Structures are given as C-alpha cells and as structure tokens.
C-alpha cells in the first residue's frame, strides 16, 4: 500500500469548512483513497473513498488532484461533533480478501466553538 | 444487533494472566478483522477472518495471541501470559464485502490494561 502523509493536527472554527489534506505521491493507478475518522473512545468510522473523480456523500466531499498525488477531505460545515482523528488510507479496492487497513497516525481535527 | 459489539469494554489483567476478548459482528457480515491500538497511535492490523477461515494472521505480535471464529460469526481474541506491552485498545471490525476497504463497521473496542 502507498504511504500517506497528513498534518498532525488542525483547528477549524465551528460552522466553517474543514479542509484536511493528504499526500500520497507514490499512489499506483489502481489504488483508491479512503478516509476514516475516529472520535474519542470510539472505533474508526468510514467516511468516503474515491479513485480519481471527486466524490461527495452526506458526510463529506473528497477532492483528488488530477495527478492523484494528493487529496483533500472537506467537511462543509464543521460542528463540534466532528472533532476526531481523521485517517487517509491508500489501498487497492479489494486486497484479495485478506488485507487489512494501514491507518497511520492521522490528523487530529479540533473544531473550536 | 445494529452494530459491532465488543466485550468487555474494559479489562484489567495482572501480568501473566490469560484474557479473552469477544467480538459480535453485524449479522451476516462475512469479513471480520481485529486491530490493536496503542495510546496515541492509529489502529494496527492483527488478523482477518472470512467466515470461519482465518486468512491472515500476519499482524499477531507473538504466539501468545490467538484468534478464532469457529462458526463464522462471534470471534474471540485470546492473549496468553499477558505482558505490559499488551496494554492497548483492541478493536474488532466487520464488513459485508470480502476484501474491500470501505464499509467497515468498527466496535468501540476493549481497553486492556496489564498491571
């Protein structure tokens, strides 16, 4: 799996858009970008994934650069409940049935009131 | 149930004691994963089951760690002769899709403290 680089921490004001960057310069052509988040004392929660097109769901938007070497997760209107550690993961869509996820340390996003 | 259930929520073990951690995945989910999360770190993969078959146990840190899922539903992670370095949160996840990286549902974990 390709390695990802994320900032250790970020702050964002409540109600504003939170933009979380992720670098994955060694991503291969058939690897997807996945985002999970982990709220304190809970297990990780799936947010969104994409290959090369921008994606949007009820939780967030995912913007992937044209060269696919970086991406940005956007929470359009951050709330205090969005305070969590956000993990960017690059992996094959299907790991052949046996591969787990490699989480890294993620970005600790703190939403300020 | 609606989610992945893990028990106990907290476990304190004396060094050298054996422990068993239970995971009840979402009914019908084929894939089941165990992860270990040390304080301040991201979760690290331990082992993977597809139904009752343990297809990958490459992440188990030593032969003191053993996992099973005999009927393809409930899974148990057993740690023998616990050591202080085993202190961590143990997370279980299940997925309805074989091998895909989306759609994982995680439990809230079991926090193991070895004293």
Image (cartoon, coloured by chain):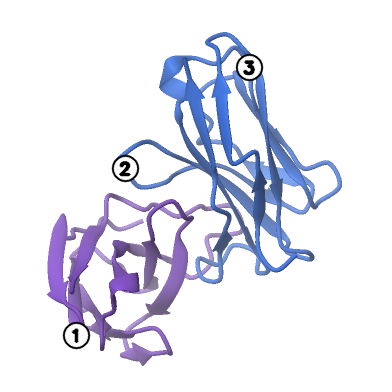
Chain colours: A purple, B blue
Residue B12 seen in render: yes
Q: Residue furthest front?
A: A113
**Marks 3 and 1: in contact by CB < 8 Å?**
no
Q: Residue at x 56, y 64 (%)?
A: B104
At mark 3, the secondary structure is loop
Marking on residue B41:
2
Q: Vertical placement of A3 versus B38: above or below?
A: below
Host chain of mark 1: A
Q: Residue at x 28, y 73 (%)?
A: A80
Same chain under badges 2 and 3? The reply is: yes
At mark 1, the secondary structure is loop
Residue A69 seen in render: no
* Residue receiving disc 3: B80
The one nearer the camera, B65 or A91, is B65
* Residue receiving disc 1: A17
Callout 2: few (<14), some (14-19), or many (20+) C-alpha neighbours within 10 Å?
Answer: few
The spot of residue A6 in percent (x, y) is 18, 60
Q: Nearer the viewer, mark 1 or mark 3?
A: 1
Q: Residue furthest right?
A: B71
The one nearer the camera, B108 or B99, is B108
Query: Separation of disc 1 and disc 2 at Cα?
Result: 26 Å
The spot of residue A77 in percent (x, y) is 26, 87
What number of labels is visible? 3
Query: Separation of disc 2 and disc 3 at Cα?
Result: 23 Å
Host chain of mark 3: B
Q: Residue furthest top?
A: B16
């Amino acid at each position: 799996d390709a390695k990802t680089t994320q900032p250790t921490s970020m702050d964002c004001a409540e109600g504003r858009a939170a933009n979380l960057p992720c670098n994955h310069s060694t991503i291969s052509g058939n690897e997807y970008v996945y985002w999970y988040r982990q709220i304190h004392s809970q297990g990780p929660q799936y947010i969104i994934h994409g290959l090369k097109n921008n994606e949007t769901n009820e939780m967030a938007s995912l913007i992937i650069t044209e060269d696919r070497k970086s991406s940005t997760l956007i929470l359009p209107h951050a709330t205090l409940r969005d305070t969590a550690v956000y993990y960017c993961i690059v992996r094959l869509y299907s790991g052949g049935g046996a591969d787990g996820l490699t989480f890294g340390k993620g970005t600790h996003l703190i939403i300020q009131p | 149930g609606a989610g992945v259930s893990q028990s106990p929520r907290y476990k304190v073990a004396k060094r050298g004691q054996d422990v068993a951690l239970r995971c009840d995945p979402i009914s019908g989910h084929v894939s089941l994963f165990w992860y270990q999360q040390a304080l301040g770190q991201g979760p690290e993969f331990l082992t993977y089951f597809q139904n009752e078959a343990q297809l990958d146990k490459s992440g188990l840190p030593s032969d003191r760690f053993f996992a099973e899922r005999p009927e393809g539903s409930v899974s148990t992670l057993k740690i023998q002769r616990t050591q202080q370095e085993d202190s961590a949160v143990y997370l279980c996840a299940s997925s309805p899709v074989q091998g895909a990286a989306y759609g994982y549902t995680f439990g809230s974990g079991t926090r193991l403290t070895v004293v």
